[in-house]
């Protein structure tokens, strides 16, 4: 199955050979593993997007400074019509990449997903077999039951920014909040989507971690 430009960039960004994210029995780019054994996701410093880019408004106080929340920001443009693989997001894969890139941990446990915040201008829902031939190829292999793929479906015709927050919990205190910053667009997603929509942040970046709690100063939202 042909990958969307975004899935190709994410796979390259974390050092994984691109592969179809929803096919069982093949390397799963969406999950960062091959279905049998978790794969390390090596990243060289040059491939890691800037971590200090202002991307959200944080009204921090002493209580916030003491928290130990892992939070990852992800920039993701998505079509507002003719929904496709470009609308699919991969929170479990991105959370595993967080641990590999920022904490040098190879997390292999299944991830439990909780949607903490739905988008305001669309719907975030689980990708299922009913999406075959719509969001992914009709000839693709069966969806992995633990893939945890979701689709962001902007309101038809809505052009603009949106966001959603997903918690991925691997157990044992290993959990990440993935904050998706969506850009709903009416045009197709070209290969240069990072430069077009995510030039200030890159495709993903660390917002906070146990060693560097959430921002303690007020920063301006990107864009």
Image: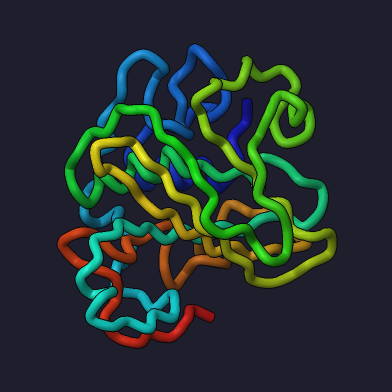
| Picture quadrant where residue 57 is located | bottom left
Report the quarter where the C terminus lies: bottom right
Figure label count: 0
Instruction: Give the vertical position of 184 relative to 61 (above or below).
Output: above
The percent position of residue 138, horizontal first and vertical second, equals: 75, 22
In this image, 179 relative to 110: left or right?
right
Farthest residue, direction front: 63
**Residue nearer the viewer, 218 or 11:** 218
Residue 79 appears in the picture as rendered? yes
Report the quarter where the N terminus lies: top right
Q: Residue at x 64, y 54 (%)?
A: 190
Q: Residue at x 62, y 58 (%)?
A: 118
Query: In the rendered view, how is the structure colored?
Result: rainbow
Q: Residue at x 30, y 56 (%)?
A: 70
Instruction: Give the vertical position of 61 relative to 136 (above or below).
Output: below
The percent position of residue 103, horizontal first and vertical second, equals: 18, 48
Q: Residue at x 62, y 31 (%)?
A: 2
| Picture quadrant where residue 142 is located | top right
**Residue nearer the viewer, 55 or 175:** 175
In this image, 40 relative to 26: left or right?
left
| Picture quadrant where residue 35 is located | top left
In this image, 158 relative to 142: left or right?
right
In this image, 149 relative to 101: left or right?
right
The percent position of residue 181, horizontal first and vertical second, equals: 54, 64
The percent position of residue 189, horizontal first and vertical second, equals: 66, 54
Instruction: Give the vertical position of 28 relative to 153 (above or below).
Output: above
Residue 188 appears in the picture as rendered? no
Instruction: Give the vertical position of 180 relative to 145 (above or below).
Output: below
């Amino acid at each position: 199955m042909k990958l969307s430009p975004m899935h190709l960039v994410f796979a390259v960004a974390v050092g994984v050979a691109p592969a179809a994210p929803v096919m069982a029995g093949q390397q799963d780019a969406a999950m960062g593993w091959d279905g049998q054994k978790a794969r390390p996701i090596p990243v060289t410093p040059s491939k890691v997007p800037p971590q200090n880019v202002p991307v959200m408004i944080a009204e921090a106080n002493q209580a916030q400074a003491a928290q130990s929340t892992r939070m990852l920001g992800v920039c993701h443009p998505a079509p507002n019509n003719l929904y496709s693989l470009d609308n699919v997001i991969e929170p479990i894969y991105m959370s595993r990449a967080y641990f590999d890139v920022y904490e040098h941990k190879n997390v292999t446990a299944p991830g439990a997903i909780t949607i903490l915040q739905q988008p305001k201008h669309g719907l975030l829902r689980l990708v299922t077999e009913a999406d075959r031939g719509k969001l992914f190829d009709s000839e693709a292999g069966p969806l992995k039951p633990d893939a945890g793929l979701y689709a962001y479906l902007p309101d038809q015709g809505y052009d603009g920014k949106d966001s959603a927050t997903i918690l991925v919990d691997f157990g044992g205190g290993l959990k990440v909040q993935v904050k998706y910053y969506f850009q709903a667009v009416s045009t197709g997603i070209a290969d240069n989507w990072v430069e077009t929509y995510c030039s200030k942040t890159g495709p993903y970046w660390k917002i906070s971690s146990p060693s560097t709690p959430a921002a303690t100063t007020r920063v301006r939202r990107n864009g």
